Amino acid sequence: MSQGLLGTGETVLYRKPVRPWVFVPFLLGCAVGDYAEPSDRPDDPDDVPRLEDVVNPRFKPPPMRQIPAGDFYVGCHEGVALELLGIRCQADEKFRREHVDAFSIDVDEVTQYEYRRCVLAKRCTPPSMRDPDDDVQRPTPYKHDLPVVYVSWRQAREYCQWRGTRLPTELEWERAARGDIARLFPWGSALPTCRLANFEGCGGELQAVTSHPEGVSADGLYDMAGNAWEWVEESPGEDFPHSMRVIRGGNFNSPAELLRTSYRGHLVESFGYPTVGFRCATSRQVE
């Protein structure tokens, strides 16, 4: 797969830790504006959160969807659709039936607007393009309705904790993506198109979180395939370094086969990446 997990044209072997700073030229080339203080942005009330949005008790949190408890199929089942894609299931995608307790999960990937609210509340640190060799931090792109990226696994956890939530487990994420039957993709078994998801060949950049209503999951969740990879809670397993965490869902430059609901990617938890975002979950039932 020439694009690799990050979709930046680099081939990356994810059985070993990666050096994410090799992607800095890509990061600088895709900027759409500085992640700046509100006073530095255009006078658009929908563009950047204001300090009063952080403390306003009437400000509604991002919408979440309730997922009932029950059994569902996990993993990869080789069939006609996978044959058309020319791929085989991986060893860590064992097809099986699992149980998940009831939970709620964000309808959308966390947006830059929502993450900025946490930064204003001084409970989150800004996303940044950091070069570990010289500890240089650079401004990051900002557009209010795009998924927030360049956030590490720990930053994603801090944001979810600020909201009184957490990162989803792998089982929760997969149940939310595929429903209670073994859907190959969130929308079903149809092969991906640019009407269904933002992936390889669909523009090569992040898109607004509600851009693909035809590709929602059975539970009405957006971007469970494509747009940005999503951090989940767990590490990938005993055969991996403790510094690795699982990512799910594919990104805007992923080939179609990486969009399947069972595919597991892995990245170093301490870095932010240009194609990795997240969504939050909770064991509580929400309105």
Image: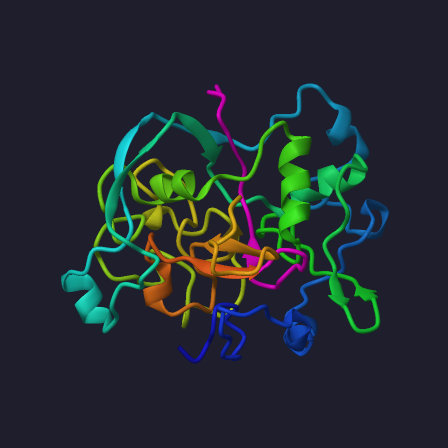
x%, y% of residue 198? 43, 60
- Magenta stretch: dominant secondary structure: loop
Give the vertical position of 120 relative to 19 (above or below): above
One can see residue 16 in this view: yes
Quadrant (top left/top right/bottom left/bottom right) for the N terminus: bottom left
Give the vertical position of 146 relative to 69 (above or below): below
Give the vertical position of 179 relative to 253 (above or below): above
Task: Check the image and name the residue furthest to the left.
Answer: 80
Give the vertical position of 18 relative to 45 (above or below): below
Quarter of the image for residue 250 reads bottom left
Question: Magenta segment: does it hold 283?
Answer: yes
Q: Residue at x 69, y 60 (%)?
A: 141
* Front in this rendered view, residue 179 or 117: 179
Q: Is residue 13 left or right of residue 269?
A: left
Q: How many marks?
A: 0
Q: What is the basis of the colouring in this image? A: rainbow
Q: Is residue 18 left or right of residue 82?
A: right
x%, y% of residue 24? 69, 74
x%, y% of residue 112? 65, 48
* Front in this rendered view, residue 218 or 80: 80
Span highlighted in magenta in the image: 268-287
Q: Is residue 113 left or right of residue 230?
A: right
One can see residue 29 in this view: no
